[in-house]
Image: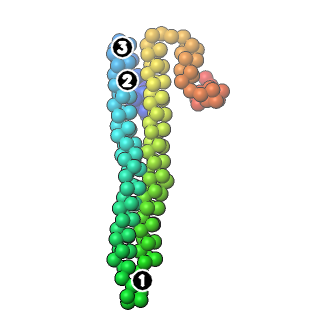
Amino acid sequence: MAAEQSDPFFKSAIMLLVDGNDAERVRTVLETDIEQMAARHDSGAALYDKASAMAPAFGMVGTLCGLINMCKGLNMSDGSSSLGDDMGTAMITTMYGCMLAHMVFGPIGTHLRTRGEEEILCKQIVVEGITGIQAGENPKFLRERLLTFVSQKQRAAGGGGGEE
């Protein structure tokens, strides 16, 4: 049955169980796997958090460059002025920096963290289920214990899965 599973974590958990490993060893291996996955996910989300923090600063650098150009064009003796264009360029870079930070990088980082937390929860449920099966717990009790990991709304819907 383990070979039929598409989730490698669940497949690994089943294999650890059927290979006759003791409960503590199974739990340790699976929890280490979860911790390593969480660290990888955290580093990916941290990249977007850093980009979100840095984008406004890059916008300000663009603003400074635009202001420098604006100051260079203050010589109005020839009658032409690019003051408005240079001021527009200076201001739009700040807007782009803020938009990237708050509308792109920040939401992506938040989404990655949320998805990582969901995956951790799913894997923790697998760990508890596998160790409960290994301990010979009553299936109905085990189901109720695993349902405590999900919200009341998901419990009312049958825990996200079909009824047996």
At mark 2, the secondary structure is helix
* Mark 3 vs mark 2, CA separation in Å: 10 Å
Q: Nearer the viewer, residue 33 or 133?
A: 33
Q: Nearer the viewer, residue 86 or 93?
A: 86
Q: Quadrant of residue 55?
A: bottom left
* Mark 2 vs mark 1, CA separation in Å: 66 Å
Q: Quadrant of the C terminus?
A: top right
Task: Say whether marks 3 and 2 touch (CB < 8 Å).
Answer: no
- Tell me where residue 9 appears, x and y as whole percent: 40, 29
* Three-letter amino acid code of the residue under disc 1: Ser
Q: Which mark is residue 31?
A: 2
Q: Is residue 136 visible?
A: yes
- Tell me where residue 91 appears, x and y as whole percent: 45, 66
At mark 1, the secondary structure is loop
- Tell me where residue 66 appears, x and y as whole percent: 38, 70
Give the mark nearer the N terminus: 2 vs 1.
2
* Mark 3 vs mark 1, CA separation in Å: 76 Å
Task: Say left or right for 46 vs 164.
Answer: left
Residue hosting label 1: 81
* Three-letter amino acid code of the residue under disc 2: Glu
Q: Which mark is residue 24?
A: 3
Task: Please tell me how crowded label 1 is: few (under 14), some (14-19), or many (20+) other residues with Cα within 10 Å.
Answer: some
